[in-house]
């Protein structure tokens, strides 16, 4: 064998050893699995898809830096998404798969009251904390403590929106319409209570429509005929909202249309078009005016992951961030022991990484749930103007 061939062979052996070492190192890196359980198909699909895309975006950003550090060790973040199709039975089976098969202790979602309530026993039995986007207060109230509300609840935003419209737009009366399902009906009932306390005249609140409805003229004819200054679309799904809005406008309604749920501007524009102008809804918790450089970076990456920006992602970016930051403060033992995580919740505080201003991010909601079981995201309320969301005002739960 020539000296050249010998050296070449030696070099190849060395190169293979290095490659094996690198591969072995990558393979052995600790992995932190986070579940995303929510509705990713059907009329409300955008709610769960935004959860998934937000988690995947943040995970990519951290993994490109070598992972997220907890207790001096960097963990690769792996997102495990499951579509529950807004079906409580599928939500239960999804939660069981995440907790029992995947060994996951931190889950983002589900998105509505019925699915969030259905997984509560699974989460508690499996030693998991989950972050629903559902408003049923019993989920977050003692003796229960494994759920953390990921956004602003309708009963928190509703009274503020109604009061704003009374003061700024002269609204004196309101009608409510809701899908005939427990989640929207609960939000309607809470909205009616809030409106009564504020002194608004309730023109109507019993009009409902069935799931799967595509012709909203019959129900909106009744609602519009009551001639309220405001029509609230209680708990309305993103696919239903533009159809309801369009029907109301085509029936001649000139008043204000609003909802306390987050919406998708793309769907509003595609289906309702100019009819959506003036529509008011709860927005993402990160408007362009208040975004930090870190949030701008997230927005750019989210567009690559999801194909486009969704305003609601400004709220749902918070879940994975606060999970990771809380684990970092408690230490690696909390990855598999949520009781340690729960002990940290009342005292946890960090600088809000998504805002320009130096404001804290912490768990809130004690006034509503007798314990802090809500992410303290900013309360942003939007109005559609010329095909875009325009910020009406920014507040907070506190």
Image: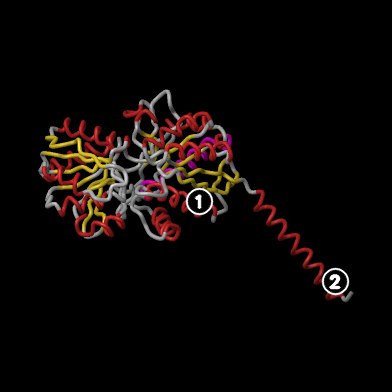
- The secondary element bearing badge 1 is classed as helix
Rendering quarter of residue 14 = bottom right
Residues marked 2 and 1 touching at CB (< 8 Å): no
Please tell me which residue lies in front, 196 or 206: 206
Rendering quarter of residue 363 = top left
Q: Position of residue 290 (x, y in %)?
A: 32, 51
Report how many numbered discs are placed on residues in the image: 2
Q: In this view, does 37 lie above or below 337?
A: below
In terms of sequence position, does the residue under pointer 2 or pointer 1 come before the other? 2
Q: Where is residue 248 in the image (x, y as percent from the top left)?
A: 17, 50
Q: Where is residue 231 in the image (x, y as percent from the top left)?
A: 17, 43
Rendering quarter of residue 172 = top left
State the residue lying farthest toward the right: 1
In the drawing, what numbered circle is on residue 359?
Answer: none
- The secondary element bearing badge 2 is classed as helix
Quadrant containing the N terminus in the rendered view:
bottom right
Q: Give the range drawn in magenta.
A: 313-333
- In reply to whether residue 316 is colored magenta, the answer given is yes
Is 20 left, or right, of 301 in this rendering? right
Q: Pointer 2: what residue?
A: 6
Is 104 left, or right, of 158 in this rendering? right
Please tell me which residue lies in front, 46 or 390: 46
Q: Pointer 1: what residue?
A: 59
Distance (Cα) linking label 2 and label 1: 45 Å
Q: Where is residue 103 in the image (x, y as percent from the top left)?
A: 58, 38
């Amino acid at each position: 064998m020539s000296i050249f061939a010998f050296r070449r062979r030696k070099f190849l052996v060395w190169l293979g050893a290095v490659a094996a070492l690198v591969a072995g190192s990558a393979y052995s890196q600790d992995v932190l699995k986070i579940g995303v359980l929510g509705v990713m198909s059907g009329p409300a699909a955008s709610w769960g898809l935004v959860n998934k895309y937000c988690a995947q975006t943040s995970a990519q950003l951290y993994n490109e830096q070598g992972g997220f550090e907890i207790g001096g060790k960097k963990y690769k973040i792996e997102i495990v998404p499951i579509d529950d199709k807004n079906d409580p039975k599928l939500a239960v089976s999804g939660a069981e798969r995440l907790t029992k098969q995947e060994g996951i202790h931190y889950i983002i979602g589900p998105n509505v009251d019925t699915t969030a309530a259905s997984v509560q026993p699974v989460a508690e039995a499996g030693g998991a904390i989950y972050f629903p986007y559902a408003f049923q207060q019993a989920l977050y109230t003692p003796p229960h403590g494994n759920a953390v509300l990921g956004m602003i609840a309708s009963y928190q935003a509703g009274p503020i929106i109604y009061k704003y419209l009374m003061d700024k737009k002269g609204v004196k009366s309101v009608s409510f319409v809701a899908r005939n399902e427990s989640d929207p009906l609960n939000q309607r009932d809470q909205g009616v209570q809030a409106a009564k306390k504020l002194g608004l005249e309730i023109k109507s609140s019993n009009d409902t429509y069935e799931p799967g409805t595509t012709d909203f003229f019959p129900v909106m004819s009744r609602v519009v005929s009551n001639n309220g200054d405001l029509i609230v679309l209680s708990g309305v799904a993103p696919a239903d909202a533009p159809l309801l809005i369009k029907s109301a406008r085509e029936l001649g309604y000139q008043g204000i249309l609003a909802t306390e749920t987050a919406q998708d501007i793309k769907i509003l524009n595609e289906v309702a078009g100019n009819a959506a102008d003036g529509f008011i809804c709860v927005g993402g918790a990160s408007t362009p005016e208040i975004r930090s450089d870190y949030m701008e970076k997230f927005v750019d990456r989210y567009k690559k992951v999801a194909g486009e920006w969704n305003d609601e992602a400004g709220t749902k970016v918070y879940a994975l961030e606060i999970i990771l930051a809380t684990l970092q403060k408690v230490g690696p033992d909390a990855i598999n022991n949520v009781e340690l995580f729960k002990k940290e919740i009342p005292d946890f505080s960090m600088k809000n990484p998504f805002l320009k201003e130096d404001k804290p991010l912490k768990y809130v909601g004690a006034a509503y749930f007798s314990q802090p079981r809500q992410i303290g995201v900013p309360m942003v309320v939007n109005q559609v103007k010329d095909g875009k969301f325009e910020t009406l005002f920014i507040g907070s739960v506190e």
